[in-house]
Image (spheres, rainbow, N blue to C red):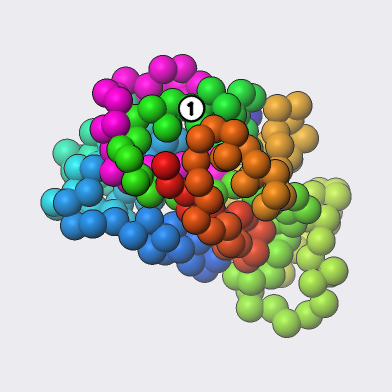
Amino acid sequence: VDWEIYAAALYDALLNLRPYQSYLEDVVTSLACLESAQVLDAGCGTGNVLARLNNGRRTLHGLDYSEAMLGRAHDKLSTAATLTKGDLQEPLPYPDQYFSHLVCANVLYTVPEPMAMLRELARVAQPGVRLVLTTPKTGYEAGYILREHADDGSDPALWQNLYASPERERELITRAISDESLRTAFLEIGKHNQRIEHGKDTRFYSREDLALLMREAGFTTVSINTTYADQVLLGCFTL
């Protein structure tokens, strides 16, 4: 997946989806951030979570591999967050036990070596840290997100297999989104999502698989629920 192209023109089109807005709120609410928390968004993308956490008093850090993603995040946050380019599978550029709160939103499923990333997150976490991690679940159906956005009460089966064919994809996007420019953006997003879903390193998790992985990395599960039209796992963890 070319994350530079994805970021430059497409990623923030998701902000127009009601389920995505609800997802961001679920992440921020689950993080239960104190007014003066020290927060790392690991894989911060274009800064959508950090922007919602910014209250002028929290110390916010974001790390991402994509310069284009970081550029868009900087446009939103300016000096409100320290943004750093880095690889989550390499040693993180932060001291031990530095952060009181960690976010890792829809990153895990794209990481070839998740244990390396999780152990680094554990290293930079303070005792009692609150980590909120989201990742698409086993059986993920992108069409259900469109269905929820459209507030469509029809049989959910009609929205399955969004990427079965270009015709199928266009039909469901047209049904869910009225704005023509947004339709075009989501058709482009679909090309990237198909590469993600079929990538050799992509892995979707069940609740049990996620809990086991986090336990092996040293984290304790507080809760695992779903969000984003019930297509994404939202886990809260601590040390």
Classify residue 90 as left or right of residue 40.
right
Work out whether residue 121 or residue 140 is closer to the camera in this orientation and state it: 121
Could you tell me the amino acid type at mark 1? Answer: Arg
Q: Is residue 14 above or below residue 192?
A: below
Residue 228's quadrant in the figure?
A: bottom right
Q: Is residue 151 above or below residue 111?
A: below
Quarter that holds the C terminus: top left
Instruction: Kindly state the secondary structure of the residue where label 1 is placed.
Output: helix
Work out whether residue 206 or residue 1 is closer to the camera in this orientation and state it: 206
User: Residue 89: within the magenta?
Assistant: yes
> Would you say residue 180 is visible in this rendering?
no
User: Residue 190: within the magenta?
Assistant: no
Residue on which disc 1 sits: 119
> Would you say residue 144 is visible in this rendering?
yes
Residue at image point 79% right, 65% down: 159
Span of residues in magenta: 85-107
